[in-house]
Amino acid sequence: MLAVWVPLLLPFLAVPLARRLAEALPPRAAAWLLAGTATVLAGGTLCSLGLLATAGLLQLPPVAALGHLSLPWLTAAAPSAPVAAALAGPVLAVLAALAVRTARRRHLELRAARAALPAAPARPALSALPAHGTDPADERTGPHPAHRPAGVQNADTRPLRASVRRARATRWLRSSLLRQPVGHQLAVLDDERADAFALPGRLRRPGRKGEPGRIVVTSGMLRALSGPERAALLAHERAHLTGRHHVFLALAEHAADLHPALRPLRAPLGYHLERWADEVAAARVGDRAVTARAVGRAALAASRSPWPARPRLVAAAHAGPVPRRVAALLQPRPSTTPATRLRAVALALAACLALTTAATLEATADLHRTVEAAQHEPGAPR
């Protein structure tokens, strides 16, 4: 069963190839490439460990008797199977514990974030927002000095200006709420700490209603950006929800738990997911420079005092290597065709993934043939 070891070794070769190729692809293609590579390699690792453990279990007398297998024939055919199973069994137990820990941590973080949000209305409630008929001149300057009461001609106007800024942000928010897609609700938190992220929804289950994904943004973040930059920010977060980028991040996190060689895929995958959303936002607002400013200012504002309940495994406009993202947005739209010199890298990566799949299938078929042969050998219990 030499084929069973191939999926355990190939990730050390395939991961550098995938990272190299992803740098030359557009963000969306790069994200799919990295997520697909992680899924195939992690699946091959899990299958190989399971096959090694199963081959050793078959040589236990109770299991051999239950399966009507010839134990002497099995022992002679695979004398090293018990040793490999003794190693694979504890590894599988550790991997299962890591998977449960990752899933539980993600569930608790998402539940805490949903609990901190206001209840999602059927349609955005606008009764608390200022009306469109407010006089802009009054908001900019306040009452005319001649109309101010005596003794307040030289009063401090800073609170008034702050109130005007809040009113402008809220009026912009009113128009933004009216344009929101039905499936992507906007949750605005009255919090001075600047933050914004895409919170995944929940699937419908018996006894529990489903919940759509929500764009979460604090009032502090809204006040840190201009109107066009807010539009770019919301388009970015909406792209995360539409593309279901949280699924990509969860796959990469679980794959990293299964094989240590897959851990280097998490950071580049997160970067390309952010770049994917950046490109969608730039196309939506029609201005790459505005989107770049929105990313930079959002990251600067969030770095001072982020919202503490933001889950770790969610996509956010200010995540990842922001200087690289801003520089990419200030360049023309990336090409959809990789350079010719990278064809060899692509072929090598495809060969690694195909060999992983073929080796996994071959190892499975080999174990099946071993079981059938052990059942038909003389001396097998009937």
Image (cartoon, rainbow, N blue to C red):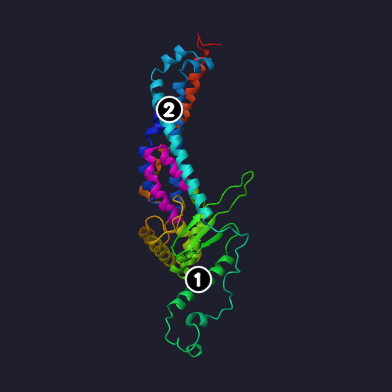
In the current view of this chain or complex, which residue is farthest to the bottom? 146
List x then y, in percent, for residue 176.
55, 67
State the predominant SS element of the stretch in magenta.
Answer: helix
Q: In this figure, which residue is indicated by the disc labeled 2?
A: 89
Name the residue rendered at 58%, 69% in the picture. Answer: 128
Q: Is residue 337 visible?
A: no
Q: Does the magenta stretch include residue 228?
A: no
Q: Label 1 neighbourhood size at 10 Å, few (<14), some (14-19), many (20+)? A: some
User: How far is mark 1 from mark 2, CA to CA?
Assistant: 58 Å
Q: Which residue is drawn at 46% across and 21% down?
A: 57
Q: Which mark is residue 225?
A: none
Look at the picture and state if 84 lies above or below 317. Answer: above
On screen, 54 above or below 201? above
Q: Disc 1 residue type?
A: Ala
Q: Quadrant of the C terminus?
A: top right
Among the two numbered marks 1 and 2 on one chain, the one whose residue lies closer to the N terminus: 2
Residue matched to label 1: 169
- For label 2, count other residues whose C-alpha is less than 10 Å away and answer few (under 14), some (14-19) or many (20+): some
Q: Do the residues labelled 1 and 2 touch (CB within 8 Å)?
A: no
The residue closer to the viewer here, 240 or 31, is 240
Q: Does the magenta stretch include residue 269?
A: yes
Q: Is mark 2 on a helix, strand or loop?
A: helix
Residue lying farthest to the top in this orientation: 379
Q: Which stretch appears magenta?
A: 248-276
Say which element carries label 1.
Answer: helix
**Is residue 270 in view from this perspective?**
yes
**x, y (%) of residue 208?**
62, 47
Amino acid type at circle 2 is Gly
